[in-house]
Amino acid sequence: MNLLETELGELKSELIDMTYLVRGQLDKAISSFYSFDKDLAKEVIKNEKRVNGSELKIDAKGEHILALFNPVAIDLRFVVASLKMVSDLERIGDNAKGIAQYVIKCENSYDADLIEKIRFKEMTDTALEMLSILSESFETDNTKLARTLFTKDERMDEINLSANQIMTDYLKNQTDPDKILQAIYFLTIIRKMERVGDYVTNIAEEIIFYVKAKVLRHKRKSFKISDTDSDSDSDSN
């Protein structure tokens, strides 16, 4: 293994670690929401510094590789993709922090009936599943697995869209200022969860880009999951 391969391996390892870190952050934020555990929410906010630190370290590593080794082909694509991926990972961490902040802001636990009507549990379970799939697809360079995330993101979008009407109907029948404010907080949390799905699919697109040299951004809806991919993806540079 030459020095470039060593540097690329370290960059990938750090990205994998950051993926698990932000998934852990989101998992804790979601748990704090359901349990209304403000101490756990504060832990998420405190740990955001680790996410930011990881982003800076990975950015520096990627820039170092570009400047020192002048990589080409798949190596160049990987470094370029990494610099985009780390930004989206940091944003996932930001949204986890944001959810935790709305747990702390709220005076009472969130309305269980409203949570059920909006299918928020399905949404949060899907988000965590997407991050687990993302980690596996990135570790193994499996673009077929990465493509499965697009369908899951569509489910997130559908829940987010349907939440608008459900929340409108809920607010029409509310006169309690505290419940109205809580509903607004909850709608913001739903938006943050939907954005997590978007960021995960952005990263999936970058995995496909560096492995397969295919640019899917803005046109991935025209691609099928089975599109020329196999479980054992390889690249011909």
Image (cartoon, helix red, strand yellow):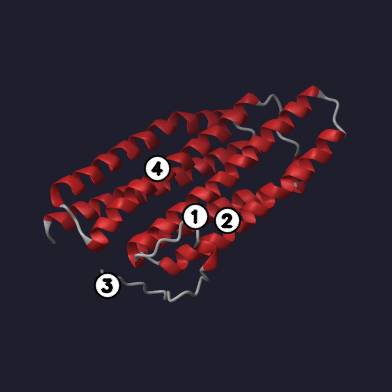
Q: Which mark is residue 236?
A: 3
- Residue 142 appears in the figure: yes
Q: Residue at x 46, y 63 (%)?
A: 146
Q: Along the horizontal axis of the image, is 224 left or right of 118?
A: left
Closer-to-camera residue (194/24): 194
Question: Which badge, 4 or 1, is on the more N-terminal residue?
Answer: 4
The part of the image, by quadrant, that contains residue 1 is bottom left
- Under tag 1, what secondary structure? helix
> Are the residues at dot 1 and dot 2 in contact (C-beta closer than 8 Å)?
yes
Between 117 and 165, the one lying in front of the other is: 165
Indicate which disc, 3 or 2, sits on the residue closer to the N terminus: 2
Identify the residue under disc 2.
153
Query: Type of residue at label 1?
Result: Thr
Mark 1–mark 2 Cα distance, whole angstroms, equals: 7 Å
Residue lying furthest left = 2
Please name the residue that numbered disc 1 is placed on: 201
Within 10 Å of disc 4 (Cα), the crowding (few <14, some 14-19, many 20+) is some
Q: CA distance from mark 1 to mark 3?
A: 24 Å
What residue do we see at 43% from left, 58% from top?
A: 205
